[in-house]
Amino acid sequence: MKNQAYRMAMLYDFYGDLLTDRQKEFYDLYYNEDLSLAEIAENYGITRQGVRDVIVRAEAYLTEIEDKTGLIRRFHTMQGQLRQVADCVQQVLDLNDAKLGSDELELLAERIKSLTNTLIQE
């Protein structure tokens, strides 16, 4: 269940703006605000099934977009690669401290490390 919630949150974060206003509202209430289908239905004066249909269509649409674009998959791949770059930069810094002591090399490595960390956090 936790994986499903994470997946739905990622889909919404990446592609939520492509949904209709109603789909966005119901999706947000259901996944982010943790309201039940019955609670949403009561608030909007429609049936529980009507709410479920809107959410299921939104899920299917978001999944279809991800299947076509692969942005989330590429995002996760890139995050892993950036962590590897950050690890390599740390190794360069450690080697520089131990053997060379080059201020210029240290400044460049620190800049790469900073840029990589910024990209990882975005």
Image (cartoon, rainbow, N blue to C red):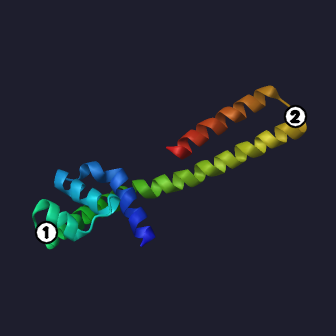
Q: Distance between the residues labelled 1 and 2?
A: 68 Å
Q: Is mark 2 on a helix, strand or loop?
A: helix
x and y percent of residue 22 in the render? 17, 55
- Which residue ends up furthest to the top in the rendered image? 104
Q: In what quadrant of the picture does the N terminus appear?
A: bottom left
Q: Nearer the viewer, residue 75 or 29?
A: 29
Query: Which residue appears at 15% of the width and 73% of the height?
Result: 49
Dot 1 and dot 2 residues touching (CB under 8 Å): no
- The answer to which image quadrant residue 4 occupies is bottom left
How many other residues sit within 10 Å of disc 2, few (<14), some (14-19) or many (≥20)? few
Q: Residue 115 carries which label?
A: none
Single out the mark in the foreground, 1 or 2.
1
Judged left or right of residue 41, residue 31 is right
Q: In this view, does 105 lie above or below 4?
A: above
The answer to whether 66 is drawn above or below residue 18 in the figure is below
Picture coordinates of residue 90 (x, y %)?
A: 74, 44
- Locate residue 73 relative to residue 57 in the image: left or right: right
Identify the element where label 1 is drawn: helix
Residue occupying image coordinates x 18% and y 52%:
20
Q: Quadrant of residue 28?
A: bottom left
Q: Earlier in the sequence, mark 1 or mark 2?
A: 1
Where's residue 40, x and y in %?
A: 20, 63
Q: Where is residue 76 in the image (x, y as percent from the top left)?
A: 50, 56
Q: Name the residue under label 2.
A: 100
What amino acid type is highlighted by mark number 2?
A: Leu
Q: Name the residue under label 1.
A: 50
Amino acid type, label 1: Gly
Place residue 56 in its image quadrant.
bottom left
Is 35 in front, or is 76?
35
Q: Which residue is drawn at 27% across and 59% down?
A: 29
